[in-house]
Image (cartoon, rainbow, N blue to C red):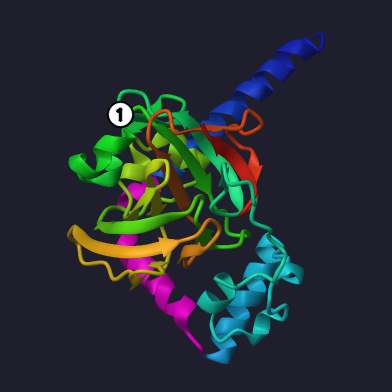
C-alpha cells in the first residue's frame, strides 16, 4: 500500500495538537474552580513572608532561575540579601532606571508589564478578551463611584512574575477613596482572561479613586491566585475581611509616584472619563510597557 498523503498527515497532526491545547486549557481552568483559592494563597503568603534563611534563599534562587530575573536594575542586586521572598519580589529599582515622562499632557504606564487590553469603555462595558467583557459597575463595585467612567477609556496592564511589582501613578491626582472589594482569586494570564467571564471584576481587588485636572481617574489593583497580598501607600498591606471596605483620603500623588505593590504577579486596570484622554496608537493588546513611559495623552 502507498504512503498516506503528506497533507493529510499534517492535518491530523495539527488537529490533535489543537485538541490537546484546548484540553490543557480546560483542565487548567477547571482546576482553579475547585482548588481552595484563598487557603492556597495564604499558605504561599506564609512561605513568601518567611525570613528563615534556608526557606527564603531556596525560594528566591528557584524563582530567579525559573523566570530569569534581571537583578542588574534593582537597587539591591544581590537577591539573597533580602530578608524574605516578599521583600525580594517587591524590590526597588535603581535610581534613574525608569524615567517618568515629563510632558504635562502624558499618561504613563503604571507598571512594567504587558497590555492585556485597552480602549473605550462602551456603554459601561470593558473588553476583557475575545468573547469576554465585564462592566465598570462590577469592577468598581459601587455604581455611583463607577458612573464617571462609563463611555470613558481603560487600559489593563498585566504584571508577569518576572516584572517589577510596584504600581505607580499614571497621572498626577489626589487620592479621594479606596474601596477594598473581596472576591475570588483566579490567575490572571491570557488563558483565564479568555475563559473566565468577568475575570477582573470577580477577583479580589483594591479600587483607588482620584481627582485630577482632567476629571476622575481610577487605578484598580486586581489580586490573583497565590498573590500573597496587595499594598497601597494610603492603606498599607490590605487585610482581607470578606466585605466591602470604603475609606476616604486626601492624598496628592504626582505622576510616577508609587501607589502600591503586589506580593506576586497580577494586574492593574486604569480608567479615565470620557473625552479626557486618548491612548497612543502604538499601544495595543500584548504591547510591552515600561513604568513611566507615555502610553497616552490628555485632550
Residue drawn at 60 percent across, 62 percent down: 164
Q: Nearer the viewer, residue 219 or 71?
A: 219
> For mark 1, does the 10 Å Cα neighbourhood hold few (<14), some (14 to 19), or many (20 or more) residues?
some
How many marks are shown on the rendered structure? 1
Residue 4 in view:
no
Residue range corresponding to the magenta coloring: 30-51
Q: Nearer the viewer, residue 225 or 281?
A: 281
Q: Nearer the viewer, residue 254 or 206?
A: 254
Quadrant for residue 30, please give it.
top left
Q: Is residue 19 left or right of residue 153?
A: right
Q: Nearer the viewer, residue 202 or 215?
A: 215
Residue drawn at 26 percent across, 67 percent down: 240
192 in relation to 230, above or below: above
Q: Which residue is mark 1?
A: 124
**Residue 264 colored magenta?**
no
Give the percent coordinates (x, y) of residue 148.
29, 36
59 in relation to 99, above or below: below
Say which element carries label 1: loop
Give the percent coordinates (x, y) of residue 70.
73, 65
Q: Is residue 148 left or right of residue 71?
A: left
Give the percent coordinates (x, y) of residue 82.
60, 84
Give the percent coordinates (x, y) of residue 3.
81, 12
Quadrant for residue 174, please give it.
bottom left
237 in relation to 138, above or below: below
Residue 38 in view:
yes
- Dividing the image into 4 quarters, which one contains the N terminus? top right
**Residue 45 colored magenta?**
yes
Look at the magenta stretch and give its main secondary structure: helix
Residue drawn at 27 percent across, 53 percent down: 183
Q: Is residue 37 left or right of residue 59?
A: left
Amino acid at each position: 500500500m502507498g504512503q498516506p498523503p503528506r497533507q493529510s498527515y499534517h492535518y491530523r497532526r495539527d488537529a490533535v495538537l489543537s485538541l490537546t491545547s484546548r484540553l490543557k486549557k480546560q483542565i487548567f481552568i477547571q482546576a482553579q474552580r475547585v482548588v481552595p483559592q484563598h487557603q492556597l494563597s495564604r499558605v504561599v503568603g506564609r512561605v513568601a513572608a518567611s525570613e528563615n534563611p534556608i526557606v527564603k534563599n531556596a525560594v528566591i534562587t528557584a524563582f530567579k532561575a525559573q523566570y530569569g530575573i534581571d537583578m542588574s536594575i534593582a537597587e539591591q542586586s544581590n537577591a539573597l540579601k533580602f530578608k524574605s521572598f516578599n521583600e525580594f519580589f517587591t524590590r526597588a529599582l535603581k535610581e534613574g532606571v525608569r524615567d517618568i515622562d515629563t510632558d504635562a499632557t502624558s499618561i504613563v504606564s503604571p507598571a512594567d508589564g504587558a497590555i492585556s487590553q485597552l480602549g473605550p469603555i462602551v456603554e459601561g462595558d470593558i473588553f476583557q478578551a475575545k468573547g469576554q467583557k465585564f462592566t465598570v459597575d462590577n469592577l468598581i463595585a459601587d455604581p455611583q463611584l463607577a458612573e464617571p467612567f462609563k463611555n470613558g477609556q481603560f487600559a489593563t496592564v498585566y504584571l508577569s512574575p518576572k516584572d517589577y511589582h510596584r504600581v505607580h501613578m499614571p497621572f498626577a491626582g489626589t487620592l479621594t477613596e479606596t474601596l477594598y472589594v473581596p472576591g475570588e482569586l483566579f490567575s490572571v494570564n491570557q488563558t483565564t482572561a479568555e475563559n473566565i467571564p468577568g475575570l477582573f471584576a470577580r477577583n479580589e481587588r483594591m479600587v483607588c479613586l482620584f481627582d485630577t485636572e482632567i476629571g476622575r481617574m481610577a487605578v484598580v489593583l486586581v489580586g490573583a491566585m497565590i498573590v500573597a497580598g496587595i499594598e497601597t501607600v494610603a492603606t498599607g498591606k490590605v487585610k482581607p475581611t470578606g466585605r466591602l471596605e470604603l475609606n476616604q483620603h486626601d492624598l496628592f500623588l504626582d505622576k510616577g509616584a508609587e501607589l502600591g505593590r503586589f506580593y506576586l504577579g497580577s494586574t492593574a486596570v486604569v480608567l479615565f472619563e470620557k473625552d479626557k484622554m486618548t491612548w497612543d496608537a502604538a499601544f495595543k493588546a500584548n504591547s510591552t510597557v515600561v513604568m513611566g513611559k507615555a502610553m497616552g495623552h490628555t485632550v
